[in-house]
Image (tube, rainbow, N blue to C red):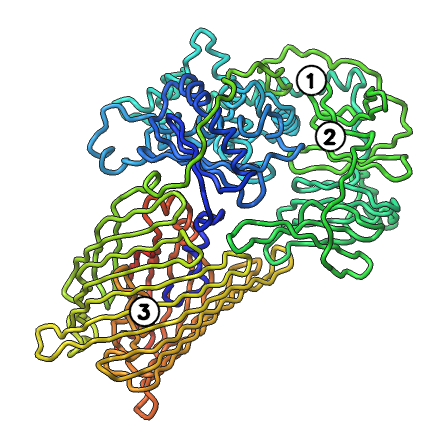
Amino acid sequence: MRFRMPSFLLLALSLAAQGPSGPWRTFHTEHYRIHHPDDPAFAAFAREVAGRIEGFHAAVGQAVGHAAPGPIDVLVRDPVGEANGMAYPLLGRPHVELWRTPPEADSPLAHNRGWEELLVVHELVHIHHLTWPQERPSLADRLFYRLTGPVLRKSPRWVIEGYATLLEGRLTGRGRPHGAYRAAVIRQWALEGKLPTYEAVSGGGGFLGDSMAYLVGSAHLEWLEGRNPEDPEILQKLWRRLADARHRGFDTCFQATFGLAPRDAYDRWRAEVTHDALLLERRLKAENLLREGQGFARLRGMATDLAVSPDGTKLLARVLDPQRPGLWVWDLTKPAEGPKTKAGELPDRAPEFLSATPRWTQARRNGRLPRRAWWSGPATITYELRRADAQGMLQPAYRTWDLATGQDRPGGAPPKVEAGPIQRQEVEGIWNLVKASPEGQATPLTRVRSAAWLPAPTPDGKAVFFLMLRAQGCEVRRLDLAEPPLETRAWPGTDPLVPGAVQRPADGPSRLEPAVPVAPSTPYRLRDTHRTALRSGALGGPAASSLQLGVGGSDLLGRLNWFALGALGEARGPRGAGAGLAYRGWALEPSLQVFHLLERPSRQDFAPVAGLDRIRRGAEVAVSYLDRSDDPFLLRLSLAHERVKPWKTPGPATDRTFGGLQMGFQDRFSRGERWGLTLSGLVSGGWGWTEGTFWRLSREAVAVQIHNPFQRITLRAQEGRLEGRPGPLDRFHLGGMAGSLEPESLGWTRLEQSALPAFLQTGTRFRSLRGELGQEVRAYVQRAEVWTPGEARPGAVRVLGVEVDPSPLLSQDIVRRILGPTRLVLGVHRPLDGLMKDRTVATVQWSLML
């Protein structure tokens, strides 16, 4: 915490969003433990997974050529109400996370026999594939690669995701390799000359750029297998070469397996796929088989929720534009404008798409994007806006947007809508629009090259708007329903060079065993998923030079976190030991921390302070409550006691007791993507007793983050005061930084500035102003001072600096599981005043948090 908002919420918000304090249960199988919230919907999903996962385990292990040993933990969650899953293939501690919400009907993931089947198979391929062990590991492997296997370290992303997608299709008989969506993407990107380069296929940005590793990667691996039909285990041989004792890189192993370099192989695949796509397009045009409607609007991203208003005058879409995503509404009564030409100028060629600019837009609200929108009246749109509850789970809330007034008010849940006669249907392996009769007959309406979906008919039945896939985004197109019906004719055969790429292959049989009965679930146990590992930290700067080493542990849900550290360092310290434990299995989260420290500010290189060298021993108990909603709130009550003994100087030990209360909040205000404001506050106060004397402490901190299109700007202000009869050990002091061993409330008297030596200024009042430009890498300027009223007031100290703070990376679950809850800040600073003026100071602050 250390009074740096909004980072005081980073740890808690990074914990399992399903709520570690809620009741959880576990299904046990031979190789797996499936953990789920104690809720009927989660229990049903987890039971289905448990009944089939051992069959998946055997099938995936046989296909990959390696099976990870158990037990493997599987965490069932649903934090954002979307279809997804993650695999964490750490050697010795792999685990999987499954999100139970099934995919939408128009998702490429929807082509499945069951969401849990597709999801679990894909993630288990990652676990078994990427934990392939190193053959005859070297000393470097044992020291530096204890948690990651050679296949994971060496393989590019297109191989990792492409292989899991390939086996997802091969084992289930469906999935993305058998779906119309993958073929549509590859076909259309090839037609437009937009197939990604070898480097970009692993994730090169742009429209659907992150999907290319799955879609293109799986198709390319199929092609590589198809070039070597005599060797059905050729991919397994690639994995063996990556893991063998020769320690060769990916490119070398790839060429040793397939006989050509990976870039050359991929370029050849691109050439053959482009040939197949162009040949198919030429034959379609020659036989006059295309009907793609008239262009209305070209979008730069995906779109959903296409619908015409009840009065037929407006068109709605939820557009995921990279610059301004949100709800877009076009006025259909206003004709689109073409290019304007002045008298005497040569007229330009008429564009395919006229300027169809939306008249109304509804952007992101306080960081949340509107979704699932529908017309609730001729000029009103109701949409879903998800907000996090106290446990961090996103829950639907509904808002109604009045286009006439621009006002937004609470709305109701969506009504049940029957499917109309115009529907999306797969025709010849391609998504197209058809008109279904009451008797079940389907009359084709479109025949497109890529994919057509989301029909939005006009109320008068004369036309239908729909989406069509393009390589740079979706197109909104309009089809006149008065056109004569299409002939029912088969697509021309092309004898493709790459079967299954530009035209989807037929579904295959499932190779997976059916579900088997499973034993009833049992309550979640900490010991099942608890892991103990090495923990470390470091402090480096004018006030501290210390390395902390020890052990710590946590469980999969983040209920229990603990550490035990010893600190070594130079004379100024701190040196000593400490241990801490926090439990988040209840709504009120208790913690305990004990410590024994030697601090010697008299040995600082700059501004040594005599009389404050001391041995500190003590403990802190605390209880916290955190509301993890969109407007998070923190409440923390603590009680700490320490005994301070002078180091190598005569004098009695001093007993200090401090009880503190801390409250924090964070609110975000924004409209759209480019501008916004986040307000954070932290108020701390408490009462202390030092050798029978009473004193009071209060400090307030506020931070304002200004989100803008350029660089994030943060303004911070802090102020504190002491009242009563505080002793020398109780006074505020400027300089230094917090480490892992000192309990939080006992550090409230420190005004942190890592570029300055400790105790540079002391007093009963402090004030600090700080401005920052940037976030993970930020430049800052700070002005700080500590003084005592009635005494000579020292001048304020100003510091310029640059800091690197990878908090978003360190708060990720995988990093937290390996390193523990960690804060790391690296800095280079330049004080402008006082003793440290014009010195360049480098600092490191690496500390563990409970």
Q: Residue furthest top?
A: 230
Quick check: 341 left or right of 93?
A: right
Label 1, label 2: how many angstroms apart (C-alpha)?
17 Å
Residue 69 visible to an observer of this rendering: yes
| Residue at which label 2 appears | 452
**Around disc 1, counting alpha carbons within 10 Å, would you say few (fewer than 14), some (14 to 19), or many (20 or more)?**
many
Q: Is residue 285 above or below residue 473?
A: above
The kind of residue on which mark 3 rests is Leu
Against 638, residue 508 (above or below) is above
Which mark sits nearer the N-terminus, 1 or 2? 1
Choose mark 3 or mark 2, whichever is in front. Answer: 3
Q: Tell me the element at label 1.
A: helix
Disc 3/disc 2 C-alpha distance (Å): 64 Å
User: Going 80% across and 25% down the picture, which residue do you hit?
Assistant: 434
- The residue labelled by disc 3 is 639
User: From where the camera sits, is residue 324 visible?
Assistant: no
Return the x and y of residue 185 as percentages of the image width and height: 63, 28
Q: Is residue 704 left or right of residue 674?
A: left
Viewer-proximal residue, 178 or 708? 178
* Residue 587 point in image, percent of width and height: 44, 56
Mark 2 crowdedness (10 Å alpha carbons): few <14, some 14-19, many ≥20: many
The outermost residue toward the bottom is 790
Q: For residue 292, which quarter of the picture?
A: top right
Residue 777 x %, y %: 42, 57
Q: Is residue 316 above or below residue 250?
A: below
Asked whether disc 1 touches disc 2, contact meaning CB atoms under 8 Å apart, the reply is: no
Query: Residue at point 39% right, 35% down?
Result: 73
Q: Quadrant of residue 612?
A: bottom left
| Numbered disc in front, either 1 or 2 | 2
Q: Which residue is mark 1?
A: 280
